[in-house]
Amino acid sequence: MRLLLVEDDTELSQNLQKELSSKGFAVDIVDNGIDAEFMGDEESYDIVILDLGLPQRSGLEVLSNWRQKENKLPVIILTARDSWHERIDGFKAGADDYLGKPFHVEELVMRIQALLRRTHDKVGKLLQCGDLKLDEECQQLIIQGHETLQLTGTEFRLLRYFMLNPGKVLSKTRLTEHVYEQGFDKDSNLIEVYIRRLREKLGKERIVTRRGQGYIFMDTL
């Protein structure tokens, strides 16, 4: 899953990028409100972590502008402005969740995972499709009644996106946009390599190719 981290504290943003990447997220960083608003409108992000005290344009204004344009990006506000009335302002502007500084990275990760599941109408602690369960904490796949499979970072990100969007036709471009960071070559064949690896682990029938359109992940066989 691809995240946009909007934070002007360079040390914090770099540390968060490292931590979130280790949890299976592709993370892009911007440090000001103008670039944040543009990126949120133009790029395909699954979630945004948004600071409020930003240079050039406040995070609250960025969020309000997105919502006025009917941009429904899931947004978690991450800020030192943690009084109750500021939380109310954030939710009124369209925030989906709110986390005050200082915070534990583990809590942020749990909030991200919970918001992603809600956004995709998934319930429970583990992401599940049919007989498959994805343990996001351990980044491993549990096949009910059979075995537990370890996944590489890219396999994990790709499978998580498939499992959040079962039955949908997902183009190669869309998959690439949600699995890799900004700047990755969208014409690369790497995504096909990882789809082949997942098929080797799950069976060819689990990921169906739709010629000229993309791939469909089958949650039931």
Image (spheres, rainbow, N blue to C red):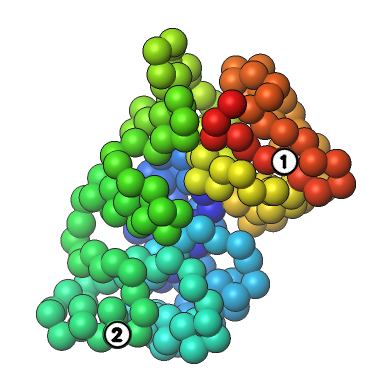
Task: Find residue 159 and name its label.
Answer: none
Q: Quadrant of residue 85?
A: bottom left
Mark before the other along the chain sequence, 2 or 1:
2
Q: Which residue is mark 1?
A: 215
**Residue drawn at (53%, 77%), measured in percent from left and top?**
71
Using the image as rendered, state which of residue 33 and residue 131 is in the foreground: 131
Q: CA distance from mark 2 to mark 1?
A: 38 Å
Three-letter code, disc 2: Lys
Mark 1, Cα crowd under 10 Å, few <14 / some 14-19 / many 20+, is many
Q: Amino acid at mark 1?
A: Tyr
Q: Position of residue 129 (x, y in %)?
A: 47, 35
Q: Quadrant of residue 152?
A: top right
Could you tell me how many numbered marks the image carries?
Answer: 2
Vertical relation: 194 (above or below) 200:
below
**Secondary structure beneath disc 2?**
helix
Which element carries disc 1, helix, strand or loop?
strand
Residue 120 position in % (x across, y down)? 45, 54
In the displayed structure, 94 sits above or below 105; it is below
Left or right of 110, for residue 204: right
Query: Looking at the image, which residue is at 29% across and 39% down?
Result: 125
Q: Is residue 75 above or below residue 182?
A: below
Question: Mark 2 highlights which residue?
Answer: 92
